[in-house]
Amino acid sequence: MDGLEKLGTHQKALSINLDATVFGSFAEIGAGQEVARWFLRVGGASGTVAKTISAYDKEVSDDLYGAGTRYVSKPRLQAMLESEWHQLIGQLQDSRGAATKFFSFVDTVSARNFSGTNDCNGWVGLRFQQQPGGCPSDVILHVNLRDSTNLRQQEAVGILGVNLLYASQHALGDANSFLASVFEDLGLQRVEIDCVELSGPAFEGWDRSELQAFLVTGGFAEAVVFSTGSEFVPPNELLYKRAIVFAPGRFDSVELLHGEFIAATLAQLPKDELKESKGGIGLFCLSSSGTGFVEKKTPPAEIVTHVNELLKLGYGVMVFRARELYTMSAYVNRYTKLRVHFAIGLSVMVRVLMDSYKDLPGTLLEGIARLFAQNVHLSVFPMTVEDAENRAKIAGLAGWTWEQTNGLIYADKIHPGEPLDHLYKYLLASGMILPQRGSETRPAE
């Protein structure tokens, strides 16, 4: 977008309406017809809009796009996109195809219901041509709507849709400029884009995995998921009503023991907890800002390298924008009310207790309170004496003492200096921190 005049939503919609080469259809389910509304009200809509449709009734929607899928889902969006595109091309290719860049915009959205009990999210899709008669390209986005009212969420969907159509015509230079254009005049307080799939000639050469990581590093999402499957999925689909085991930490070198942390903790999940859920799931988690004492952003390519190594161990990976465990658990609590279990090495727990939490007014006490107030347990695995001694040298753990067993230090055998030791003893005695005996091999961070 560098060098281009920044346009508002009204100006973007009008500029597209006045472009005689761009013509297409809109199909929207949920959250009104806010995208089409922009093009209809700014003037010159006959130059852009071939058709608008809103299939709110389930039977009507099934008749148009087929039954058997959830109404707010990627399969439903893909069915809409295929149906609308084939109808558009079938009706207009002969008469307008030589001079027209066709597009089909579709969305299926669950905006805030009257009682405010639903997961406010949706799928947005666009198929478009870069030149008349050219092969089409697709954009599929999963979005979370973060505004507190239905009206504001509808408004956000409208802005996002106009931005997406405008970006497809004017911001295809690289992933950064494209996503920045799609996100313009919104922000994380209003919308999150936590899953993106691009295909077609417009995006040739773009690295899909790096783009997924860039959603976090670029400030478009609080978290994204890399699953063990071949397709990207949004976090809400993976986490919904699950008992979660997270293994966070620094992954400068990947060791099998991280997988053992997850496996051991999953095996200990209470049966009554699993009965109330859709089952347990274990995930590694990384922070794009790092997890060490010195915070720094990790480039998307480096994140993807770590992710690919971790996926080989058989568990998916979540990448978070923030580094604190309490922010990770707060995010997960959007989608599950079950306990969140962090399967961590002792060195990670030390970082939790040594963090200054400088962004919180209550510093350490507030950070610890926020973490454990969210129904969180820390399953803490041992570290070696060598690791503890090295950490004491580089991190200044003055006043910490420990006892070792066969060269390992367990969570109930390490003691912070006072007054932190009193808080630590309370967390142990209350069962919020659970010492794990685990493997006798060297634990990774």
Image: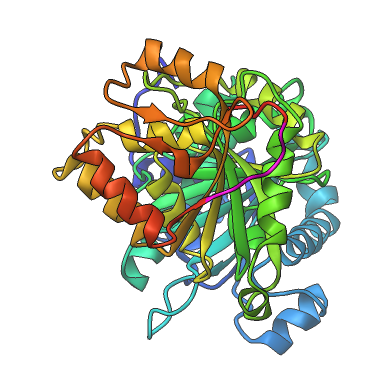
The total of numbered circles placed on residues is: 0
* Picture coordinates of residue 154, whole percent (x, y): 41, 65
Residue 330 picture quarter: bottom left
Image quadrant where one finds the C terminus: top right
* Picture coordinates of residue 376, whole percent (x, y): 45, 59
Residue 187 picture quarter: top left
Question: Front-most of 224 and 419?
Answer: 419
Residue 223 part of the magenta segment = no
* Picture coordinates of residue 102, whole percent (x, y): 71, 45
Name the residue at 48% across, 41% down. 411
Residue 437 part of the magenta segment = yes
Q: Main secondary structure of the magenta part?
A: loop
Q: Is residue 284 left or right of residue 419?
A: right
The answer, for residue 158, to whether it is visible in the render is no
Question: Front-most of 253 and 171?
Answer: 253
Q: How is the image coloured?
A: rainbow
Question: Which segment is the magenta one?
Answer: 435-440
- Whether 118 is drawn above or below 90: the answer is below
Name the residue at 33% across, 27% down. 400
Residue 81 picture quarter: bottom right
Name the residue at 40% across, 31% down. 351
* Picture coordinates of residue 222, whole percent (x, y): 46, 44
Image quadrant where one finds the N terminus: top left
Name the residue at 81% across, 43% down. 314
Q: Is residue 414 left or right of residue 135?
A: left
The answer, for residue 304, to whether it is visible in the render is yes
